[in-house]
């Protein structure tokens, strides 16, 4: 029976029991996430409860429960990003979202650095000039101007902070989903990588900038501070991208291994459906990570490309005349910018490859002869899902981040 009011429309399950109901393979595997084992079988589809339409994903069961392996792996890098004024996000209730307190802190840091940069431009740095190497010195002039450009990355990061919070919430919620499916804690562990990135990258970025100033310009120590800050945010954004990609790749590897183990003792088709549900969520997360870093990483890639181009052209201009002390700074800048761009592209390629190729290999090697029809249907739908759902890390739809991007940059520089 149907109510006349469309807003309260309900669909009641048919009571005809003469013919046995064919099991719905597509939806049965997802029952685990929508009902407890103590609940009865769902027999009616009714309007969602009040407030459910907002679609808020709860990462934690209560506000004090921050027991998450995924969050622990990302936490050191996120703390540094927050301290630098790039990550105005906190845990509010059961979700991550942009908070007023951290946003005010980020704006204060940004205004302070802007004032510092204004002082640097006013108290102009005296360049080391000589009668030789005019093109090289022009490159250095441009280079120290370009060094200050990434300060605009802070507002871009604030603009994308809401999406960053949503991705972080989804990743932690995904971990809890994994725990419920496998009935074990997710064993993902990145070792000392997060700590090394959080501590090592700022030290490396400060060191390279100090060496660059020593070899290229006469400077007072107070003048190098804003350059060091800007260099740190460039390196740490690349480091955060590396951590996210590495974490997704390791998570996909773990799930594919668990799935292969489950296939050895496959019972009902719901087990395959459970892992298909996990894969669908993970494939969405990898796309969301690309969109959450979208404009920030686009700017980072363009900036690195510009730095690499300027420094390499400056070095090439001096090869015939002989390299000098000033070229040390150019070489260091070019080397680290190239390395950062390489790792950004390589880790994205690794994450995408783990999410798609690993699962396709497991599915293609499955022996279907001894499985029942429902399990075979689930395997086929799982394989089709891996083919139809994109797993490439796309930056807001502009371009994919993978090894081909680094190859394209290399080919352009060789021209």
Image (cartoon, rainbow, N blue to C red):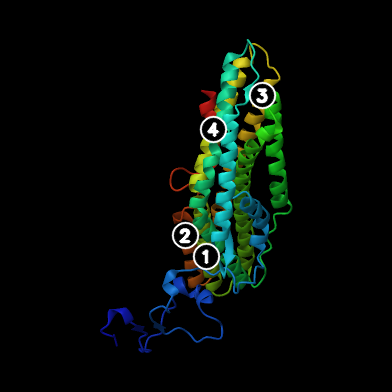
The answer to whether marks 2 and 4 mark residues whose Cβ atoms lie closer than 8 Å is no
* Location of residue 365 in the rendering, given as x and y in whole percent from the top left corner: 57, 58
* Location of residue 1 in the rendering, given as x and y in whole percent from the top left corner: 29, 88
Could you tell which of marks 3 and 2 lies nearer the N-terminus? 3
Q: Mark 2 = which residue?
A: 385
CA separation in Å, label 3 and label 1: 58 Å
Q: Mark 3 = which residue?
A: 217
- Circle 3 Cα neighbour tier, 10 Å, few/some/many (<14 / 14–19 / ≥20): some
Could you tell which of marks 1 and 2 lies nearer the N-terminus? 1
CA separation in Å, label 1 and label 4: 39 Å
Q: Nearer the viewer, residue 259 or 189?
A: 189
- Circle 2 Cα neighbour tier, 10 Å, few/some/many (<14 / 14–19 / ≥20): some
CA separation in Å, label 3 and label 2: 57 Å
Above-or-below relation of 105 to 13:
above
Please identify, in this view, whether the residue under mark 3 or under mark 2 is nearer the observer: 3
Give the residue displayed 54% in from the left and 68% down from the top. Answer: 272
Q: Mark 4 = which residue?
A: 305
* Location of residue 207 in the rendering, given as x and y in whole percent from the top left corner: 72, 35
CA separation in Å, label 1 and label 2: 8 Å
Q: Tell whether 154 sits left or right of 213.
A: left
Give the residue displayed 43% in from the left and 70% down from the top. Answer: 54
Secondary structure of the residue carrying tag 3 is: strand
Q: Mark 1 = which residue?
A: 276
- Is residue 87 among what the camera can see? no
CA separation in Å, label 3 and label 4: 23 Å
The answer to whether marks 1 and 4 mark residues whose Cβ atoms lie closer than 8 Å is no
- Where residue 324 sits, quadrant-wise, is top right
Secondary structure of the residue carrying tag 4 is: helix
């Amino acid at each position: 029976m149907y109510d006349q009011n469309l807003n309260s429309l309900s669909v009641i399950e048919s009571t005809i029991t003469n013919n046995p109901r064919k099991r719905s393979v597509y939806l049965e595997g997802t029952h685990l996430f929508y009902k407890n084992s103590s609940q009865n079988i769902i027999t009616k589809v009714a309007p969602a409860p009040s407030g459910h339409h907002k679609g808020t994903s709860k990462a934690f069961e209560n506000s004090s429960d921050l027991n998450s392996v995924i969050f622990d792996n990302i936490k050191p890098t996120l703390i540094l990003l927050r301290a630098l004024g790039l990550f105005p996000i906190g845990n509010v209730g059961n979700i991550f979202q942009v908070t007023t307190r951290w946003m005010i802190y980020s704006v204060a840091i940004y205004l302070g650095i802007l004032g510092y940069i204004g002082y640097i431009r006013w108290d102009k740095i005296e360049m080391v000039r000589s009668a030789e190497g005019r093109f090289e010195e022009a490159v250095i002039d441009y280079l120290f101007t370009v060094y200050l450009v990434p300060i605009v990355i802070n507002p871009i990061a604030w603009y994308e902070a809401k999406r960053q919070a949503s991705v972080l919430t989804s990743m932690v919620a995904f971990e809890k989903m994994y725990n419920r499916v496998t009935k074990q804690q997710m064993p993902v562990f990145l070792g000392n990588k997060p700590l090394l990135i959080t501590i090592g990258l700022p030290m490396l970025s400060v060191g390279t900038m100090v060496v660059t100033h020593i070899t290229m310009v006469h400077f007072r120590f107070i003048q190098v501070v804003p350059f060091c800050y800007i260099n740190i945010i460039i390196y740490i954004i690349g480091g955060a991208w590396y951590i996210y990609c590495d974490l997704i790749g390791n998570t996909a590897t773990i799930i594919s291994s668990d799935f292969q183990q489950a296939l050895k003792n496959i019972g009902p088709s719901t087990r395959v459906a459970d892992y298909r549900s996990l894969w669908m969520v993970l494939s969405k997360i990898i796309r969301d990570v690309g969109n959450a870093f979208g404009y920030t990483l686009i700017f980072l890639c363009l900036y690195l490309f510009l730095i690499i181009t300027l420094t390499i052209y400056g070095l090439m201009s001096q090869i015939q005349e002989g390299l000098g002390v000033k070229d040390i700074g150019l070489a260091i800048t070019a080397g680290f910018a190239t390395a950062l761009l390489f790792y950004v592209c390589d880790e994205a390629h690794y994450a995408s490859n783990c999410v798609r190729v690993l699962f396709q290999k497991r599915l293609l090697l499955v022996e279907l002869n001894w499985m029942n029809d429902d399990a075979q249907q689930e395997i086929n739908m799982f394989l089709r899902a891996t083919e139809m759902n994109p797993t490439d890390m796309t930056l807001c739809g502009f371009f994919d981040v993978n090894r081909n991007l680094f190859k394209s940059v290399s080919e352009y520089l060789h021209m």
